[in-house]
């Protein structure tokens, strides 16, 4: 399987800048986790769209910033990341971050789920947050400006 990352807008209009740099950063993250990059779709959508997915597949009637569907096969990391751009923008305001940094945090959160991280317990969540912070620090300089 070849490594490929695709970006889509479902029912929103948001332009992701520096896609090539993001793809390289994701690939390096997956490799550092000892996995092989496969096919990953990053789909930006609205709160409403993501709530419907959340209800349908996870039986949760709540807003969330990301839902990750893992299609990985053994060590090959593949899947779909559905990200609410509205939630990302709101979280950025809440946590005093810029929107791009928050979007990158949510993307890497989904990638870490595909690599086997979980965040159901406090301990798991702490490990995931530490990994998020580490990989955010590994972004190319052009992605942090």
Image: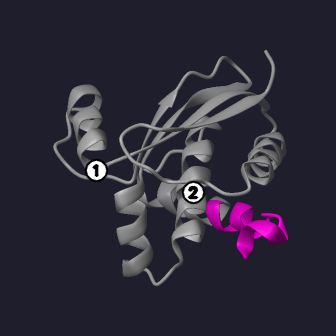
Residue at the image point whose x is 32% and y is 52% from the top: 64
| Residue 74 quadrant | top right
Q: Residue furthest left?
A: 61
Q: Which residue carries the number 1 mark?
A: 47
Residue at the image point whose x is 38% and y is 54% from the top: 65
Residue 112 pos. (x, y %): 61, 46
| Residue in front for this viewpoint, 138 or 44 | 44
| Residue 11 quadrant | top left
Q: Which residue carries the number 2 mark?
A: 128
Residue at the image point whose x is 22% and y is 35% from the top: 52
Q: CA distance from mark 2 to mark 1?
A: 24 Å
Residue 112 drawn above or below residue 91: above
Quadrant of the snapshot with the N terminus? top right
The residue stretch that appears in magenta: 132-145
| Residue in front for this viewpoint, 49 or 53 | 49
> Viewed as shown, does residue 60 lie left or right of 135?
left
Q: Is residue 127 visible?
A: no
């Amino acid at each position: 399987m070849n490594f490929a990352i695709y970006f889509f807008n479902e029912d929103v209009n948001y332009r992701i800048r520096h896609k090539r740099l993001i793809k390289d950063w994701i690939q390096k993250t997956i490799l550092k986790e000892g996995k092989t990059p496969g096919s990953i779709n990053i789909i930006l959508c609205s709160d409403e769209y993501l709530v419907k997915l959340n209800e349908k597949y996870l039986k949760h009637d709540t807003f969330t910033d990301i839902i990750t569907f893992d299609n990985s096969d053994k060590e090959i990391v593949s899947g779909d990341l559905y990200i609410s751009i509205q939630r990302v923008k709101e979280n950025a305001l809440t946590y005093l971050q810029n929107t791009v940094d928050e979007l990158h945090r949510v993307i890497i959160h989904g990638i870490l789920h595909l690599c086997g991280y979980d965040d159901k317990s406090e301990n798991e969540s702490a490990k995931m947050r530490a990994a998020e912070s580490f990989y955010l620090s590994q972004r190319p300089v052009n992605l942090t400006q």
